[in-house]
C-alpha cells in the first residue's frame, strides 16, 4: 500500500454476505435514481453539474479534516507519540491511519514500527496529547460555518459521524459551541466496525428515518468515502492537503471545499456567500 518495505496492512472483511446483498440493493436503487441526473464530467472525473432526484433529505459530516483542521494537529500528535518511542511519524503512515477508528488506526502504527504498546495505551496517550494541542490551534475549515447556516435556513437536518472518540468530539465541538447545531452525533463508541465499513453511515441514515440514498455524506478521506458509498449514501469527497493522494473513486462528487458552488447546487442551496 505504501511501499514494499513497509508491512502489508490487510483489511479484514467485516461485512457479511447478507449485508453485502442489502448494500448492493441500495446501490442499485441509487444508480436508478441517478438516471435523471444532468452531469458534465471533466477529464479528471469531477462532476460539474448535478441535480439529485429527489432532493437530499439530510447531510452527515465527518469531523476530522472535513470540519476542522484537526488532521494537521493529529500529525503533530503522531510525531510526538513516536518521538517518545524513538521513531519517526511519516506522511505514509499518516495516510494509512487516516479516517479509521482508534483501534484499527493504532494497530497499523504498532505493526508499522513493531511497537510493544497495545492500541489502548497509544489511543489514550494520543487523545491526551490532542486535547492539549488543540488549544489555540484548531480552526473551522473554510466554508463550514456558512454551510451550516445555509442548511439551517433550508431546514435540512444534519449530523456528525466520526471515527474519533466521543471525548475528542466534545472537546473539538465545545471549542466553538457547535454540538447543539446537529441533530445527533455518532462516534467510534457507537459502532462495532469503523470506517471503511459502512456501519456508521447506515446507522446515521436509520437515525434520520431515511433511505441511505436520500443522505448526503461529506468526507475528506478515502476510508470515509468508501464507507459512505458502501452504505448507499451520496458520498461527497472534500479532499484537503492531508488527503490529496487518496483514492476518491468511490465518491459521487469531488468538490474543492465546503464553499464549492457544486456542493451548494447538489444540496439545492442558494450559492455560498462570496
Image (cartoon, rainbow, N blue to C red):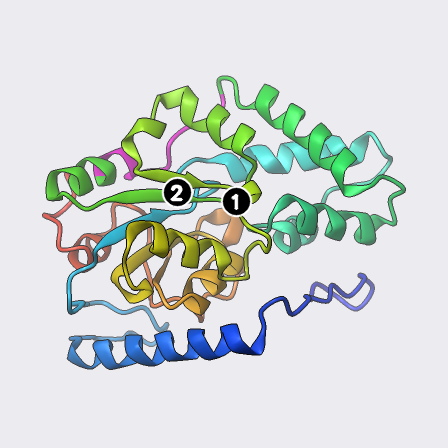
Residue at x 27%, y 69% (from the top left corner): 47
- Which numbered disc flags the more N-terminal residue, 2 or 1? 2
Marks 2 and 1 sit apart, C-alpha to C-alpha, by 12 Å
Label disc, if present, on residue 31 of the rendered structure: none
**In this rendering, does residue 138 appear at all?**
no
Q: Looking at the magenta stretch, what is its main secondary structure?
A: loop
- For residue 272, which quarter of the picture? top left
Depth check: give the residue in front, 70 or 169.
Answer: 169
Q: Which residues are magenta?
A: 137-146
Residue at x 15%, y 61% (from the top left corner): 55
**In this rendering, does residue 124 appear at all?**
yes
Residue 32 colored in magenta in the image: no
Q: Residues within 10 Å of mark 1 (few under 14, many from 20)?
A: some
Residue 141 colored in magenta in the image: yes
- For residue 267, which quarter of the picture? bottom left
Residue at x 51%, y 72% (from the top left corner): 19
Amino acid at each position: 500500500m505504501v511501499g514494499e518495505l513497509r508491512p502489508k496492512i490487510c483489511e479484514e472483511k467485516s461485512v457479511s454476505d447478507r449485508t453485502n446483498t442489502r448494500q448492493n440493493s441500495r446501490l442499485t436503487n441509487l444508480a436508478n435514481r441517478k438516471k435523471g441526473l444532468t452531469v458534465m464530467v471533466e477529464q479528471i472525473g469531477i462532476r460539474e453539474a448535478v441535480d439529485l432526484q429527489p432532493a437530499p433529505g439530510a447531510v452527515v459530516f465527518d469531523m476530522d479534516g472535513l470540519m476542522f483542521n484537526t488532521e494537521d494537529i493529529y500529525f503533530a500528535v503522531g510525531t510526538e507519540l513516536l518521538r517518545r518511542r524513538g521513531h519517526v511519524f511519516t506522511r505514509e503512515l499518516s495516510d494509512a491511519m487516516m479516517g479509521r477508528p482508534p483501534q484499527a488506526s493504532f494497530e497499523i502504527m504498532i505493526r508499522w514500527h513493531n511497537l510493544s504498546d497495545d492500541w489502548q495505551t497509544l489511543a489514550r496517550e494520543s487523545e491526551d496529547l490532542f486535547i492539549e494541542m488543540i488549544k489555540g490551534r484548531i480552526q473551522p475549515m473554510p466554508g463550514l460555518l456558512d454551510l451550516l447556516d445555509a442548511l439551517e435556513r433550508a431546514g435540512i437536518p444534519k449530523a456528525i459521524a466520526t471515527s474519533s472518540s466521543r471525548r475528542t468530539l466534545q472537546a473539538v465541538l465545545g471549542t466553538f459551541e457547535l454540538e447543539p447545531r446537529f441533530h445527533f452525533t455518532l462516534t467510534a463508541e457507537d459502532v462495532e466496525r469503523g470506517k471503511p465499513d459502512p456501519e456508521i453511515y447506515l446507522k446515521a441514515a436509520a437515525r434520520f428515518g431515511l433511505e441511505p440514498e436520500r443522505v448526503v455524506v461529506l468526507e475528506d478521506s478515502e476510508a470515509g468515502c468508501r464507507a459512505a458509498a458502501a452504505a448507499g449514501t451520496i458520498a461527497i469527497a472534500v479532499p484537503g492537503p492531508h488527503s490529496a493522494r487518496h483514492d476518491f473513486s468511490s465518491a459521487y462528487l469531488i468538490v474543492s471545499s465546503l464553499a464549492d458552488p457544486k456542493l451548494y447546487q447538489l444540496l439545492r442551496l442558494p450559492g455560498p456567500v462570496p
